Image (cartoon, helix red, strand yellow):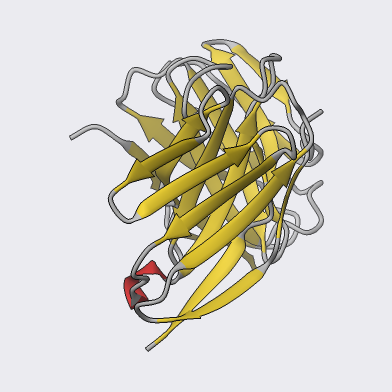
Amino acid sequence: DGGITQSPKYLFRKEGQNVTLSCEQNLNHDAMYWYRQDPGQGLRLIYYSQIVNDFQKGDIAEGYSVSREKKESFPLTVTSAQKNPTAFYLCASSKAHTTETQYFGPGTRLLVL
Amino acid sequence: GEDVEQSLFLSVREGDSSVINCTYTDSSSTYLYWYKQEPGAGLQLLTYIFSNMDMKQDQRLTVLLNKKDKHLSLRIADTQTGDSAIYFCAGLNSGNTPLVFGKGTRLSVIA
């Protein structure tokens, strides 16, 4: 059963803490993306990766970091530098970068304690 | 770069048709997409249209593209309560940049 999984579904962060959101895909897609969704804001691109060991900043990369050590995995770390991390985080993948449709995971909701 | 605009809310009665509109700025957009998001879930691809097409129909969904006016619409026939969701329009241009999403239109279906 092919698809994109994100874990956990809910995540709580304490002040000053780094947390990591998981995104895994078994679609054999080259490109992966992280978006942040706030109410009424739509989707904003945080980081994307077109190939293993390479990634680019999106529109709101400050306070976030990523890695792409494996084709299947693109974890997102929300660092303590991100002062307003409460949001719904969506991971997506596409077969290639510029011409292919994106498919989304179920999302992770991050809340600050 | 691409910019995509949508109205934020739409309310229709069950059984009526819904029309969700979207405008975009980049005339080089090669693909235009519609995604659906149900509460607490990820985005589900509904349909997409190539820029060389004017219309695409898929069961209850009809997509119309007016390239001259840079206007895209999604018509849902016989709207059901299960269609209540947020609908996102997204554009992909020929440059090396990811999809650009509108802010989403929240469709409410009244029984």
Judge whether B60 appears above or below B15 on screen: above
Report the front residue among A33 and A9: A33
Is residue B102 visible in the rendered image? The answer is yes
Quarter of the picture containing the C terminus of chain A is bottom right
Judge whether A62 appears above or below A52 on screen: below
Q: Quadrant of residue B77?
A: bottom left
Quarter of the picture containing the N terminus of chain A is top left
Question: Extreme left residue here?
Answer: A1
Give how far across and how far down residue B74 sits, in percent. 51, 52
Q: Residue at x 36, y 30 (%)?
A: A25
Is residue A103 visible in the rendered image? The answer is no
**Is A81 on the left or on the right of A99, as rendered?**
right
Report the front residue among A22 and B92: B92
Q: Quadrant of residue B94?
A: top right
Give how far across and how far down residue A81 sits, in percent. 81, 46
Give how far across and how far down residue A96 sits, in percent. 49, 14
Q: Residue at x 71, y 65 (%)?
A: A40
Give how far across and how far down residue A42 sits, in percent. 67, 54
Report the front residue among A50 and A65: A50
**Is A93 on the left or on the right of A26, as rendered?**
right
**Is A86 on the left or on the right of B32, as rendered?**
right
- Mark count: 0
Q: Residue at x 69, y 21 (%)?
A: B97
